[in-house]
Image (cartoon, grey):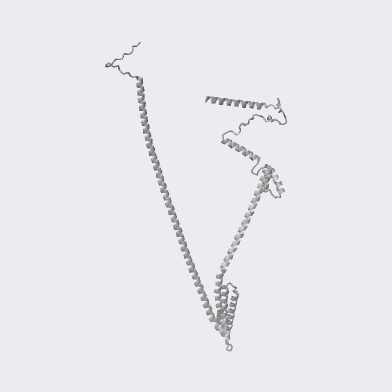
Amino acid sequence: MTAAPVEKKINGHEPPRFDPRALAEAEAIRTRAAADAEAARIKAQGEAEAEKIKAAEEARKQKIANDKAEARAREEQAAREARIAKLNREREEEERAARDAKEKAAAQEQADEAKAAEIAAAEEQWRQYALRFYTVCAIVAMPVQIAAFYNPHALWLMAAPIMLEGGAWVVLKGARAAAASHRPHWHYRLIAWLLAFIAAGINLWHGLNAFDPATAIGTAFASVAGPGVYDLHEHGQLRKRDGKLSWRQRRAAAKAAKAEAARKAAEEKRRAVEKEAAEKAAAEAAEKLAEARAKEFPKVWQHALRLAAALGETTVTEAVWKRAHRDIEGADPSESAEIIRLRNAAEARVEAARQKRPVNTVSKTTNAQRAIQVKGPRKASSYTPVPPRRRRGDTPKFHPAARSLAAEAKRAANATRTNSKVDEAGQ
């Protein structure tokens, strides 16, 4: 046996007793407290750093946002100034265009006025020259006529030349008045030319008998030239006022009308050729369509021919074809039972592909394994007190192959059910 340790007294007192476990716990507490303090300090420092980083990031984001807002404001201001400048330029251009148009219109009006004044001045000058020429011709022609009518016993006959020359003048003035009031004036001019030729005849006859041929011809020409030149002036004024065309203008208009008629004839001929070609193409297309329909849909085509004959149609029209197709196929020409079945099958395949499942699945009906020959349960009749009872041998037996397939399906279903239960137990 080991003797218990003897504790020595120090200065008459017993030494303090230390518990190692308590010391270890205290040391652990101090260590844990120091670690917690250090962790708290690190956490606080980390949080401070995170706050500082977050504040810096927020400041950076705010600065970026402020810069973007400032840039956007500058862009908007620049765009606004650009729009204002563009509007100002457009307004200035419009004002300049209006001013130019006004100046151009004023210049054109001045030019028209100047041209009209020039034309009026030329017309007035031409009229004055015609009057003066008429006066000179009358002065030249009248002496010979007066000499022709001179008779010492009948001096009043010398007024006949004045009557002829003055009559022509008066009648021409009457023609001008008739034209101004839009009345016929051709007979006035005819009378004036008749009087002028009478005076010319008198001058020619008396000039050849009493004077020389030059005098006779000159005075005869003067009798015709004076009224003729004045009538030419008046006739030109009338044509201008009435808007009559000159010979060149009439010739140009006739040539243009002939060219237009030729163009219209060529256009009509071209349209007729195009129409004939279109009708021919349409007939060929209709014939090909009829052949295709007769080949692809013989029953419908035969019924359509009979239906067209019954309705009094010479050809199978679209309405007749549509009705015949509905009579035979039960649907419009673009539909049929076969097309509907194909569409349904295609839609089923697409739906199965979208849901990632096989197209051909086992029927989920309650009696999937029941054969066609198995009779279903019948409801009790109201007039039969007891429903009939089924007896052995009423239903024909399944084929051996069908029985083997049913057994295989049952075993596969049991194996699948067992596996699912094992998996659930494992989980």
Which residue corresponds to the image point at 58% horizontal and 63% vertical from the top-left?
Answer: 256
Residue 216 is left or right of residue 48, and the answer is right
Classify residue 144 by image quadrant.
bottom right
Q: Is residue 58 left or right of residue 370?
A: left
Q: How many marks?
A: 0
Percent across and percent down for residue 352 are: 58, 35
What residue occupies the far front of the structure in this picture?
Answer: 12
Image quarter (top left, top right, bottom left or bottom right) of the N terminus: top left
Q: Residue at x 37, y 33 (%)?
A: 44
Front-lying residue, 190 or 374: 374
Nearer to us in this view, 200 or 369: 369
Residue 92, above or below 236: above
Please, which residue is most extreme toward the left here? 11
Task: Describe residue 289's horizontal placement relative to residue 12 as left or right.
Answer: right
Vertical order, 427 against 147 (above or below): above
**Residue at figure coordinates x 56%, y 26% from the top left:** 420
The quarter of the picture where residue 163 lies is bottom right
Q: Residue furthest bottom?
A: 153
Residue closest to the eye, 389 or 106 = 389
Q: Residue furthest top?
A: 1
The spot of residue 90 in percent (x, y) is 45, 56
